[in-house]
Amino acid sequence: MKIYVVGIGPGNREYMTPQAKEAIEKSDVIVGYTLYVDLVRELTEGKEIKSTAMKQEVDRCKLALESALKGKTVAFVCSGDAGVYGMAGIMAEVAAEHPEVEIIIVPGITAACSGAAVLGAPLIHDFAVISLSDLLTPWEKIEKRLHLAAEADFVVCLYNPKSKKRHDYVDKAAEIMSAFKGWDTPCGYVKNIGRDGETGVVCTLADLKNNEEIDMFTTVFIGNSQTKVINGKLVTPRGYQDV
């Protein structure tokens, strides 16, 4: 009885690791959010598919567990890395009473890494990754994390920066950051990482406010006090001498 919790990367097959591909191919059942299952559709021929819409994470975990308890090998697919805002943790919680089911986490390339590569090298030094989604985390706690990350001069990578209901959250994040960073701080954002329509934009902190291009399929990068733009690329020096 085995469940692979598989990070498939941002969506393009070039970003999927051989380990992730092998786990899907070895599985009898594929479980996941409908969009993510569609991204690996060519690997699922002849396999049982169990997918659900968004906001049904626990239900997907239960579907995976039920199949595993019937003796089937399951691949539970997630976008990016299964352990970074993915399903690895909740799958372990749902299966807590079933130690006989082996949970294997298959890492994938998360948006912080793949998005940074599009923009240049913004994450070369210490950085923090913060989700602006308040579905599972109170906004007050998110605000505190933003404040402390800015005060500590981390480069900050923002996941889930904006949605229809949270259209001004990235604006609020920029305001919090501006207490410790200038509005001309180099920043950037990447839309549709590894998929059709991928777009990377290098900008400033001020450009993040009232920005209609930023949405839920965008990852935002806010530089630290030493981040700079070199030949159009966002770069955070690590501090090597004589460079």
Image: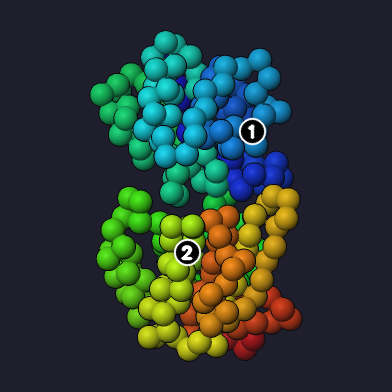
Crowding at label 1, few (<14), some or many (≥20) Cα neighbours within 10 Å? Answer: some
Q: Where residue 235 sits: x, y (%)?
A: 61, 77
Q: Is residue 86 above or below residue 65?
A: below
Q: Amino acid at mark 2?
A: His
Residue at the image position 62 percent from the left and 66 percent from the top: 213
Residue at image x 70%, y 62%?
199
Secondary structure, mark 1, is helix
Q: Quadrant of residue 35?
A: top right
For the C terminus, give its image quadrant. bottom right
Q: Which residue is mark 1?
A: 38
Residue type pointed to by label 1? Asp
Residue 157 position in % (x across, y down): 49, 66
The label nearer to you, 1 versus 2, is 2
Residue 151 visible in image: yes
Disc 1 from disc 2: Cα separation: 28 Å
Query: Which sits earlier in the primary sequence, circle 1 or circle 2?
Result: 1
**Vertical comparison of 138 with 30: above or below:** below
Which one is in front, 28 or 236?
A: 28
Label 2 SS: loop
In the displayed orientation, state which residue is furthest to the top: 70
**Percent x, y for residue 161?**
48, 62
